[in-house]
Image (spheres, rainbow, N blue to C red):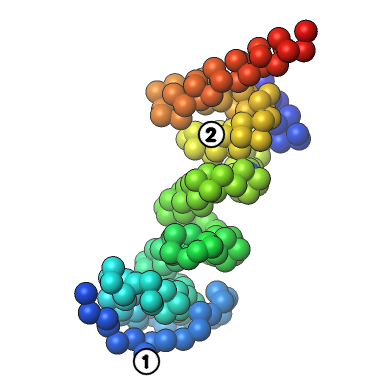
């Protein structure tokens, strides 16, 4: 019954380091053959990462954003097997979302797609997805939020497995804020049932109460 309901939902979200020699225009993420050994990739990525840390100090970070981006992409392109490559995806997505105004959401989605393709089993995937979802949520971009989490809802419908409530909660919140109360109610109900002790369940119960009052008021006015 849960899966049928969700299928219906889907049918209807301090000194400035000298970096001049490192300045380069941000590169696109590219697929290419890498001949470096794992150890060479690890060392090369660590060298660039340390430069990023120097450029990321509070007093110089904003002035060096494009340089930082370029260095992250160099790690991603040139050292894809190094542990810092996956972390560079996560950190670069954070830069695009938090440090630029307006946020560079298109670049974020491109990076996310590459990340999923290269590292489908990465332990950082959940953190990246939560970061993107939270960004849309905080910016009240309900259509974008719904679109982003919908693949996870489809996967839930397909497998019947919902390991954590986050994606369904964001999906329901998008529906709720688009005044699609019927579908939001279904999502919230599933969260309460499957994750009763979660923080999302508490918020879901509050949302359901709001929905009930809104529907009652609408029905009263319709009489």
- How crowded pointer 1 is (Cα within 10 Å; few <14, some 14-19, many 20+) is rated as few
Furthest residue in direction front, as rendered: 221
Is residue 139 visible to us here? Answer: yes
Q: Which residue is mark 2?
A: 169
Is residue 157 visible to us here? Answer: no
Q: Quadrant of the N terminus?
A: top right
Tag of residue 21 = 1
Whole-percent x and y of residue 9?
Answer: 70, 31
Q: Residue at x 77, y 12 (%)?
A: 222
Total count of labels: 2
Q: Is residue 163 above or below residue 113?
A: above
In depth, the one of 25 and 152 nearer the eye is: 25
Whole-percent x and y of residue 118?
Answer: 53, 64
- How crowded pointer 2 is (Cα within 10 Å; few <14, some 14-19, many 20+) is rated as many
User: Along the polypeptide, which appears first: circle 1 or circle 2?
Assistant: 1
In depth, the one of 134 and 161 nearer the eye is: 134
Whole-percent x and y of residue 20?
Answer: 37, 90
1 and 2 marks in contact (CB < 8 Å): no
In depth, the one of 145 and 110 nearer the eye is: 145
Q: Quadrant of the C terminus?
A: top right
Tag of residue 91 = none
């Amino acid at each position: 019954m849960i899966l049928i309901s969700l299928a219906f939902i889907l049918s209807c979200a301090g000194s400035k380091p000298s970096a001049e020699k490192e300045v380069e225009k941000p590169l696109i993420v590219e697929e290419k053959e890498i001949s470096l050994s794992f150890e060479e990739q690890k060392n090369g990525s660590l060298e660039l990462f340390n430069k990023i840390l120097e450029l990321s100090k509070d007093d110089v970070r904003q002035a060096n954003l494009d340089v930082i981006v370029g260095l992250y992409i160099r790690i991603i392109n040139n050292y894809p097997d190094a542990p810092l490559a996956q972390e560079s995806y996560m950190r670069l997505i954070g830069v695009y979302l938090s440090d630029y105004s307006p946020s560079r959401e298109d670049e974020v989605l491109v990076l996310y797609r590459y990340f999923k393709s290269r590292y489908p089993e990465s332990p950082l995937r959940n953190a990246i997805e939560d970061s993107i979802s939270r960004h849309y949520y905080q910016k009240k971009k309900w259509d974008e939020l719904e679109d982003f989490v919908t693949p996870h809802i489809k996967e839930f419908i397909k497998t019947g497995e919902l390991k954590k409530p986050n994606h369904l909660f964001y999906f329901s919140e998008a529906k709720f804020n688009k005044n699609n109360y019927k579908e939001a109610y279904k999502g919230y109900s599933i969260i309460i049932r499957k994750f009763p002790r979660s923080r999302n369940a508490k918020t879901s119960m509050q949302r359901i109460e709001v929905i009930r009052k809104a529907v009652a008021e609408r029905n009263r006015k319709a009489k």
